[in-house]
Image: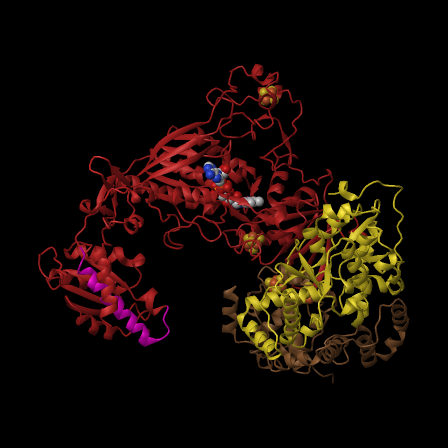
Chain colours: A yellow, B brown, C red
Amino acid sequence: MNYLYFPGCSLKGTGRAYEDSILSVFKGLQLPLEELDDWNCCGATSYMAISEMKAFALSARNLALAEKQAHSRENFGLVTPCAACYLVLVKTQKYLQEFPDIGDKIKTALKSANLEYGGKVRVRHPLDVLANDFGTEKLASFVKKPLKGLKVACYYGCQIVRPYAEFDDQHNPTTMNRIMHALGARTIDWALKTRCCGGSLTGTIQEVGMRLSYILLREASRLGADVVATACPLCQFNLECYQKQMSREFEDAISIPVVYFSQLVGFAMGLPAKELGMQRLFVPFKFNPAAESVKGGIHVHS
Amino acid sequence: MPVWRGWDKIKYQAQLDPAFAEEVTSIPGGEKLFDCIQCGTCSGLCPLSPYMDFTPRKIIAMIRAGFKGEVLSSHTCWLCASCYACTVECPKGVKITEIMYATKRLAIREGVSPKRFAIPVLAEEFFRDVESNGRNSEGRLIMKLYLKTNPFKALKQATLGLRLWSQGRLGIRSDSIKRKSELKTLLKSLEKERMVRSRRETAHAGEAK
Amino acid sequence: MSTPENKTNGTPRIGVYVCHCGINIAAKVNVAECVEFARSLPYVTVAREYKFICSDPGQELIQQDIRDGKIDRVVVASCSPLMHEATFRKATLAGGQNPFFFQMANIREHVSWVTFDKEMATLKAKALIAGAVMRVARHKPLEKTRVPVNPDVLIVGGGIAGIHAALTIADSGKKVYLVEKEPTIGGHMAKFDKTFPTLDCAACILTPKMSAVRSHPNIILWSYSEVSQVDGYVGNFKVKVRRKPRYVDEELCVGCYECIEKCIFKKAKFEDEFNIGLSQRKPIYIPFPQATPLVALIDPETCTEFRTGKCKKTCVDACERKAIDFQQKEEIKEIDVGAIILATGFKIFDATRIPRYGYGKYPNVFTSLEIERLVNASGPTGGEVRLKDGGKPNSVGIIHCVGSRDINTNRYCSRLCCMASLKLAHLIKERTGAEVYNFYIDIRAAGKGYEEFYDKLLKEGVHFIRGRVAEVSDWTMTADEEGKLVIRAEDTLIGVVRRIPVDMVVLAVGLEPSADADNIRRMFNISCSYEGWFLERHPKLAPVSTFTDGISLAGACQGPKDIPDSVAQAGAAAAEALALIDKGFVELEPNTAFVQDEFCSGCCTCVALCPYSAISFSADNNRASVNGALCKGCGTCVAACPSGALQQNLFTDEQIFEEIRGVMNYV
Ligand SMILES: Cc1cc2nc3c(=O)[nH]c(=O)nc-3n(C[C@H](O)[C@H](O)[C@H](O)COP(=O)(O)OP(=O)(O)OC[C@H]3O[C@@H](n4cnc5c(N)ncnc54)[C@H](O)[C@@H]3O)c2cc1C
Ligand code: SF4
Ligand code: SF4
Ligand code: SF4
Ligand code: SF4
């Protein structure tokens, strides 16, 4: 497998820790990852609200660039950690295939900019790559500091599995849980793993957005989770950065670390905290591995 | 004598726009809207429906009935977070999230999106940023947003911003791509294209898959 | 090509009749122009138009032309042959000509209903008429053959539908084989306590019929059995039935329960299928006290003797009648029957397919069928509605349309779950006093006395919330939600999203075709609808018969149905079987294949291909031959024969090519 990497705007900004940890983990697992050259904004949700055609065009340019950069490499994936970017890229692929009239218009537009897309790119989420290409068993063998005793609330958010369930069940996704089990951690069984965090509403109608995030944190705490693991820069931001405001607004002292799943993977692999962007967290993640546990998490599953 | 206000409660057919539904549903798969059985699954699942002025189900009913003005000036679509919870469970395959996008686009086009309401502003700022640079910088975006809608809030948020900045999570400098002209040409060629098609075309595309 | 000859040895004289079908055809096809055109075709001596040619005067027109000697062959350009071919063949015969000197041109379904342009439609109609004229000129007189009908009937499935059909036929003096795959007959109805809308006791009305089946001299009941093979055709089916071993002799066992009591397992510990896993049974068991036949059976999966060979076999000692037989083997019975009724019923929708309703995840989410067992006085709780921990529910939510009316599961409405939900709401409220909330999209209560039952429930104070439930979950927002199941739905009439905490959730699961419906369909060579329900011949005018003559349908195997409808259909199916038997013979269509000996090379390609095993090969003359009684006229062999030796009546090469020539040449 060959992987190109599409960071998207967030991973260069608020989600920098996501980028740090993904790059370090892939490097640590000896999975080559090559950043897509001259990528542009994916088009994401707000763009869709103004011009859907232009949003598709933005995505299509990225896909076209990826196809070109991959040259003749068979079997390559465009690894896209941000959930919003991931969804828009997948959606564009689907629309280009399913609605020929849209496909034709985009094709013509690409041509006018001397670009071309043949439909060969596979958009992949890093959860998918780690669990299904690399494999959780192999991952477990890289674990140096098993997360024994840690209770993780795996939070998938919406757009990784909805509406296109590409690599996991859209009602009850389990990929992240399996990865956490491979690290030796336990996961809580909760009903809210794909409930919306509020998305960009936290920035626009804060009262509403914050409440949605609060519901998630409250339930995770109620069920005794030590940490919430996310797979999307916006989710992570919403859940982590407003905890002070939430505590005030809802008169409920909320304080629970919210990290990227990839930070936990790197942590268990024994990578230095700095390389994982741990210092960028608002609510610090602390974990002292239970006294000298011997091996990785291979034996911990279910 | 008090003014008799009974007429407020009644909606005359003449006040409705029978063509509105066609307009909204001309997106791919949009014709499914006419299959809706008003069961409320979408509203029940929607995490934002409690804050909407009309629930997603009600919006569907209003679109079908031609309540153009009410739908386009409603807050509902701007509250939709595109989480797709409704779409995947709708028993009739109504593409509710896409309908929400479609009403957003129409509202902006018709210039009736709620004034001074942060979300459309965010969308438009985002749009402009990307049109010119190919990328967006969240920091600049958020700053502009607050200045435009609610300067006081910008002050209140300053602490959060500072913290983000000190942790290296906020770039105020604008990032941009190298081949800007390539992108300009690409987007320009679609200037007039909308995804709006006639009902018949849409139906055919649906069959094709 | 030689001039074709007819009965009277002359040049064919063909009458063409073009139908308006009211405006169905006339609105799109210029009928007068077609008639004019028909007159110009070879052999045509009469061409007429008529408003409804299928009407009596219309048919009379054809008959009179034949009687007057104006014509000796008939072409009708009208609707589909499925609709009226039989009608016009009869008219041809009534006029005094062989009924196969007739051909139909379908200018309604194939032309006027599917063509927008009037001119194109007329052109296409003309082409089809020309084809029919050229074809009928090559027709030969054919005769139908008669075969006697075996008077015995096979009924598959012993639910209420199968039981009712069996009793009806047996009472008329005919012999019935009733094959049921479970150890007892009774089907789903045997599991209910009360039935809507009258709330009469299911057992009181069902068990007398079950024992009547057992004691009827004309009924042979084979429970714990399945049909394994079906050959033959209407009036003369050959059927093999596989009887599974019960390891208890049916003739000797009297159902005294002694063996069960004395089984080395002191406590019942295996999942009881009849109670849908809500209680336990022993390895040797009787499904329920009114089981028919009332005979014990051993489940080899759980019986110690079968698993280890080292059981003390206390059951054997306990049985005074020496009925237990560990050596019992599967038996294959071969029977001949004239008619078959399928009554294999339904299965309930698997609620785990909708994860957001929490079935299989939260213990107190039940299916409606499970609740039927809980409210049943002879069920696992003696009729008490209990939570999994034994507690009494204070609030219960009933969710309608689970697995129905949903493109993600089944599109159709299951028709009776609304009423079953109302019944359960009433029974739960009566037994526990709990607050009951029904979440519905529409209340479908269209039967006799059904709306009145709904009225009654409204008066009883059952809550009705119009909204399809979004989710059942255990995450909480308020103190009163702690430890409860929370139902979230939009109350669409009030216009708010509500969260209602309850102790128990009941899923009104929809109905689906039974698990082996597809198997049965293949075996009996019938068709299924898109969803897998057995397909009736016509949704309105032949809702009981199938496309395979001699096989009819009864009960929920044809589509969701409540008990009154199942019984009504079972009566109709019995009448169809009896009518066939009473007639005493069947007429076989003559459109069979035949081998032209002089061309057959004896390659046997056809023999293996025939789906009805109608072709045999004789080594003596190295030729294949077709048994006309078995041939269904599918044409497979005709297309496959490399020597062109196989031909089919009504579809000879000559007839087909002439038809094509007609279509191509004249317009
Ligand atoms: C929860 C619930 C409550 C209901 N309550 C009511 C009510 O109160 N009133 C009412 O009118 N209706 C009620 N119904 C509907 C009722 O169950 C059906 O109308 C009725 O059972 C249909 O009868 P049937 O004989 O067609 O099918 P079934 O009852 O399903 O019987 C079919 C029989 O065929 C057997 N069988 C299946 N496949 C084979 C095979 N391959 N070979 C041999 N045998 C086979 C089965 O074992 C079964 O015994 C209810 C349904 C449900 C699900
Ligand atoms: S879930 Fe679908 S069918 Fe139900 S109200 Fe919403 S859009 Fe209509
Ligand atoms: S996609 Fe929008 S309308 Fe649908 S459930 Fe999510 S927020 Fe609500
Ligand atoms: S053989 Fe043993 S286990 Fe089996 S039924 Fe008899 S006593 Fe029970
Ligand atoms: S009968 Fe009622 S509950 Fe059953 S599918 Fe139809 S509407 Fe839904």
| Side (left or right) of B173 relative to C218 | right
Is residue C561 depicted above or below C76 in this figure?
above
Percent x, y of residue C481: 78, 52
| Side (left or right) of B194 relative to C63 | right
Percent x, y of residue A166: 64, 57
Is residue C504 depicted above or below C381 in this figure?
below
Residue at point 14% right, 55% down?
C96
Between A145 and C120, which is closer to the camera in this rendering? A145
Percent x, y of residue B120: 73, 77
Could you say which quadrant of the image residue A3 lies in? bottom right
Instruction: State the residue lying farthest toward the left.
Output: C9
Between C330 and C92, which is closer to the camera in this rendering? C330
Is residue C621 depicted above or below C18 in this figure?
above
Is residue C378 depicted above or below A140 in this figure?
above
Between C533 and B26, which is closer to the camera in this rendering? B26
Asked if residue C132 lies in the magenta stretch, the reply is yes
Could you say which quadrant of the image residue C212 lies in? top left
For the stretch drawn in magenta, what is the main secondary structure?
Answer: helix
Between C161 and C24, which is closer to the camera in this rendering? C24
Q: Is residue C543 visible?
A: yes
Q: Quadrant of the N terminus of chain C?
A: bottom left
How many numbered marks are there?
A: 0
| Side (left or right) of C166 relative to C376 | left
Q: Is residue B40 visible?
A: no
Q: Quadrant of the C terminus of chain C?
A: bottom left
- The region drawn magenta spans C114-139
Percent x, y of residue C556: 48, 46
Asked if residue C33 lies in the magenta stretch, the reply is no
